[in-house]
Amino acid sequence: MSMLDEIMCLGDGLIHHGKHSNRIYVLKAPKKNSAAFIDQMEALAAKNGYGKIIVKAMDACRSDYLAKGYAEEAFLPNYYEEGKGCAFLGKYCLPERQKVKNKAEIEQVLAVAQGKRDEQIPLALEEGFACVKMQEIDVADMAALYKKVFASYPFPIHEEQYIKETMRDNVIYFGIRQGEDLVGLSSAEIDWQNRNAEMTDFAVAPSCRGKNISFILLNAMEVEVKKAGIGLVYTIARSVSHGMNVTFSRQGYIFAGTLFNNTQIAGKIESMNIWYKKLSGSHPAY
């Protein structure tokens, strides 16, 4: 776990930082005193030689970051309570981090995904497969599948204790079993205060790809979080993953922007696409 980045408070904000993704990711930006917070972040980035700072900030604070040289990479409407939007604001601290070598590939994957928007997919699983909500007794199988699918990941999903703790806190996991074998997995990370959920941590065993498992998992999670009163769902997907980008586009998600050279996943730093969807009738703000 020591190789993974650390979550900590910085001033009035909450950040995820370290050499693993070689960045600072601001999970919660302060609503006031943005200038002082930005100075603290940039001092920490300079001290550690980080390549990027990426900030999730309330729309009303966006101008504070833009004035300091940050650029908006994505925007989620209705992210915060009372319908306020969330801007993803990036700043590149090292010139090489800003170079996007596979931009044409990213654009091609996005074009294919958007061309399949709302394409109908059967939600029936093949015989012998079942979609189930994960419980604590499943954590060993869950950690094993994540280890099989991901060479690296920004959070310690390979660890049973971490999965158990998130399950007890604010994360709902769904899985697909083929008989006794766990072959698909995903999670909905719920922000109860703001009534939104990140649809994330999708993993499908190599032997079961091409069976629409991610699409079926996503649909099951949407049904679950909508019942819980969640109004906005979104994802931060690997930009060069045809399967994941197509999955969200087919399910009616809207493209919100690309976070370039952003996240250490599957053994390297990758750009990430953000997609979102409003779940109608779930929350007064929507």
Image (spheres, rainbow, N blue to C red):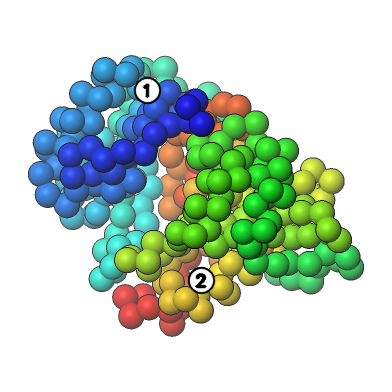
* x 43%, y 39%: residue: 259
With 115 as the anchor, is 18 left or right in this view? Answer: left
* x 53%, y 24%: residue: 101
Q: Crowding near pointer 1: few (<14 within 10 Å), some, many (20+)?
A: many
With 75 as the anchor, is 153 left or right in this view? Answer: right
Residue type, numbered disc 1: Gly
Observer-nearest residue: 162 or 176?
Answer: 162
With 75 as the anchor, is 235 left or right in this view? Answer: right
Q: Is 19 located above or below residue 250 in the figure?
A: above
Q: In x, y percent, where is residue 235?
A: 50, 53
Residue type, numbered disc 2: Val
Say which residue label 2 marks.
Answer: 225
Distance Cα–Cα, label 1 vs label 2: 35 Å
Say which residue label 1 marks.
Answer: 51
Observer-nearest residue: 219 or 140?
Answer: 140
Res. 77 image quadrant: bottom left
Q: Quadrant of the C terminus?
A: bottom left
